[in-house]
Image (cartoon, rainbow, N blue to C red):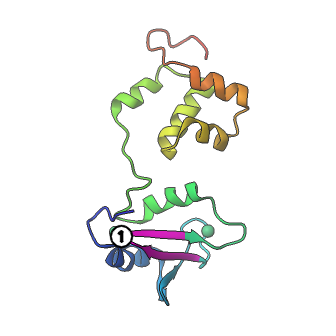
Amino acid sequence: MACGLGLPASECVRKHWCKALDGQQVGAHWRATCPLCWKANFEISIIGVGIAWNCHTDPECDHGDIRLMLAKVLPCYKGGGRTVARSELEKLLGLSGAALRLRVACLAWDCAPDVAAQKLGLPSRTARRAKAARPDLAGNRRSA
Ligand SMILES: [Zn+2]
Ligand SMILES: [Zn+2]
């Protein structure tokens, strides 16, 4: 993933990641504090022009949740910081119940409906109906 502020990966790790996560270089990698569990088991490495990371705590932290935290602590993180257009938000007004939760989850986690349904723990029948639901801006009172 490229640095949102335009630094090359090696400088981004030093100036952005290490500063935010209290990181230190260990051999070819950096060891830092995981932004989710706050254990010093977070490994950062440079692969090509990108930055790879992993929490080595057992059990390992959820990558989606780590991404959300990275988006908060890193000044340059793009992965979890997608902005949502107002038109997308407006569509949510026409949804309710599981359909609404599913759509919000897709936007919040920037993931496909199937992934979002799984993370929300929706039963498969509910997930199917939620995915099929179309925003109904005219009649907000109709239940989904
Ligand atoms: Zn950066
Ligand atoms: Zn962790």
Image quarter for ligand 2: bottom right
Callout 1: helix, strand or loop? loop
> Residue drawn at (49%, 83%), measured in percent from left and top?
29
Instruction: Return the x and y of residue 138 as percentages of the image width and height.
Output: 44, 9
Using the rendered view, name the quadrant where residue 121 is placed: top right
Query: Which quadrant is home to the N terminus?
Result: bottom left
The amino acid beneath tag 1 is: Val
Q: What is the crowding at mark 1: few (fewer than 14 residues within 10 Å), some, or many (at least 20)?
A: few
Number of on-image labels: 1
Question: What range of the chain is rendered magenta?
Answer: 42-53
From the image, tell me which residue sits under label 1: 49
* Closer to the camera in the image, 2 or 134: 2
Q: Position of residue 105 (x, y in %)?
A: 54, 39
Of residues 58 and 28, the one drawn nearer to the viewer in this rendering:
28
Q: Is residue 35 within the magenta segment?
A: no
Residue for point 54% across, 76% down: 43
- Is 47 one of the magenta-colored residues? yes
Instruction: Judge whether 80 appears above or below 127 on screen.
Output: below
Please name the residue shown 51% across and 18% down the image.
134
With respect to residue 7, does 116 lie above or below?
A: above
Image spot of residue 60 (x, y percent): 67, 66
Among the 4 quarters of the image, the one containing residue 55 = bottom right
Most common secondary structure along the magenta stretch? strand
Place of residue 82 in the rendered image (x, y in percent of width and height, measured from the top left): 39, 47
Q: Quadrant of the C terminus?
A: top right
Residue appearing at x 63%, y 37% in the figure: 117
Side of 81 relative to 32 (left or right): left
Which residue is most to the left?
A: 6
